[in-house]
Image: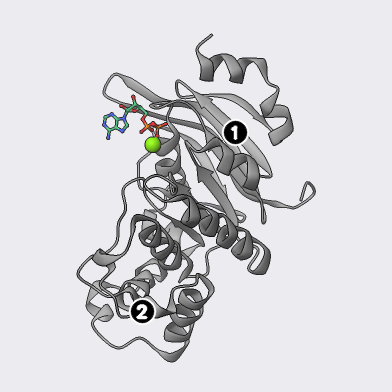
Amino acid sequence: KGNQPSLLSAQGITKSFGGIRAVQGVNFDVAVGEIVGLVGPNGSGKSTLLGCLSRDILLDAGRIVFDGTDVTRLRAMQVARNGIGRTFQNVRIFPELSVWENALMGRQWKGVGLRDMLRPADIATRQRAADLIELMGFPQLIHEYAGNLSGGQMRLLELVMAMMSRPRLVMLDEATSGVNPTLIESLKHYVKVLNQEERVAFIVVEHNIGFIFSIADRIVVLNDGRLLADGSPEQIQHNEEVIVAYLGA
Ligand code: ADP
Ligand code: MG
């Protein structure tokens, strides 16, 4: 995938919270169809960087170009409409709605307002929801309350919701936390399927290093809000600085 055109290009991304410099001057690129693993110790700025890229967090400085458009000053909803989907470190679903209704809520990322969400979805939208639920292997749960799903099934449902608007880039924040090993394998499988079938690029933030190494084309390492390394899984595995940062040696 080395020669694909750029999909996301971020330069000098900087964000502080009070006196805490969460992200400091990070450059970050994603090519079309690329799966990028984003790793680093707790508090190294991974979630903040994702929030800056999806515009859920206002940047202090930096510039973000997505698919040829400068999105630095756009709001999160506008960026979503431009083709970025994401999930959050803490599960965000609607527990009192069914799996099916949750999937349809993914329409919000296409800019459908909450008021319009009360109307029935059009055929294309319902077909998309049905296809995604089928693809992710839980059509038997379609009428289940989302709150009754296992942690892993909730993560898959979030991925369905993020995929509703046919994004070109999806960001997953710690999607394997609280997920049993079988469903981690499923999640890995579906990320690969979506990557291949719809050419969706992914930024995958993970504590689960095994998951990252088995899925990422490239790995970016943050430490203390700064970029520590950016390379192939092979290069990262043998990078002295990364080993020191992780093992604290
Ligand atoms: P990671 O996802 O790598 O664990 P975060 O991006 O969540 O790291 O956090 C980076 C730093 O910014 C940490 O020191 C964290 O405490 C701080 N931080 C993150 N979000 C906020 C916030 N909303 N308010 C204050 N400090 C924050
Ligand atoms: Mg985080």
Task: Report the front residue among 224 and 210.
Answer: 210
| Residue 88 circle label | none
Residue 119 image point, x, y percent: 26, 86
Task: Report the front residue among 160 and 112.
Answer: 160
Which image quadrant for residue 117? bottom left
User: What residue type is disc 1 on?
Assistant: Val
Up the image or down, 25 lies above or below 81; here it is above
Residue 221 image point, x, y percent: 56, 29
Relative to 80, is 2 on the left or the right?
A: right
Up the image or down, 111 lies above or below 202; here it is below
Residue 240 visible (yes or no): yes
Which residue corresponds to the image point at 43% horizontal and 45% vertical from the top-left?
173
Which residue corresponds to the image point at 45% horizontal and 37% vertical from the top-left?
49
Relative to 85, is 210 on the left or the right?
A: right
Which numbered mark, 2 or 1, is in the foreground of this view?
Answer: 2
Task: Report the front residue among 87 and 116.
Answer: 87
Q: CA distance from mark 2 to mark 1?
A: 36 Å
Image quarter for ligand 1: top left
Residue 178 image point, x, y percent: 36, 47
Relative to 166, is 144 on the left or the right?
A: left
Label 1: how many Cα within 10 Å (few below 14, some 14–19, many 20+): many
| Residue 142 circle label | 2
| Residue 220 circle label | 1
Label 2: how many Cα within 10 Å (few below 14, some 14–19, many 20+): some
Which image quadrant for residue 61? top left
User: What residue type is disc 2 on?
Assistant: Ile
Q: Which element is circle 1 on? A: strand
Please tell me which of labels 2 and 1 falls first in the chain. Answer: 2
Q: Which element is circle 2 on? A: loop
